[in-house]
Amino acid sequence: MEKKDVSKFRVSSKEDLNTKVSKSSFCSVELKPLDIEINPTQTTRPIITNIEGILKRIKISLSGLEDNERKKEILNYIERVKKGEEELTIILRDPLGESYIGEKDG
């Protein structure tokens, strides 16, 4: 089986939030059109979750930051995605090819 180092998924409905995400500790996560990129650190652990779980982790991370317009914009957009009012593309970049969105082939 060929390894893919990039996985993309377009969230266009509330049902898409249940899509499985398997993310290795070497994987970065990018959200478009929000222009957010989350890079791995030495303490990043592998996770198996769904897209809603990824969005929840982002909200938790933002909760520790000072309030500003950018933070409000991101949180509001995430809420609209969760309601099915906006679309979002999630991109996983994994140099080892161990991360994926949806059911893994093979």
Image (tube, grey):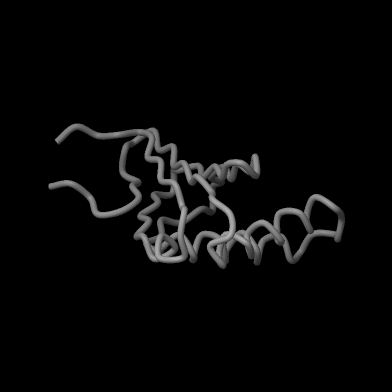
Task: Please give the name of the residue rendered at 46% of the width and 52% of the height, measured from the top-left corner.
Answer: 11
Q: Is residue 62 left or right of residue 19?
A: right
Q: Is residue 57 left or right of residue 74?
A: left
Q: Is residue 42 left or right of residue 64?
A: left
Quadrant placement of the N terminus:
top left
Above or below 33: residue 18? below
Indicate the position of residue 68 as horizontal and vertical percent values: 87, 55
- The part of the image, by quadrant, that contains residue 57 is bottom right
Q: Tell which of 8 and 62 is nearer to you.
A: 8
Task: Please give the name of the residue rendered at 23% of the width and 50% of the height, measured from the top-left corner.
Answer: 104
Indicate the position of residue 81 as horizontal and vertical percent values: 57, 59
Q: Tell which of 46 and 37 is nearer to you.
A: 37
- The part of the image, by quadrant, that contains residue 22 is bottom left
Task: Please give the name of the residue rendered at 65% of the width and 39% of the height, measured from the top-left corner.
Answer: 35
Above or below 37: residue 57? below
Task: Please give the name of the residue rendered at 65% of the width and 64% of the height, measured from the top-left corner.
Answer: 59
Q: How many marks?
A: 0
- The part of the image, by quadrant, that contains residue 20 is bottom left
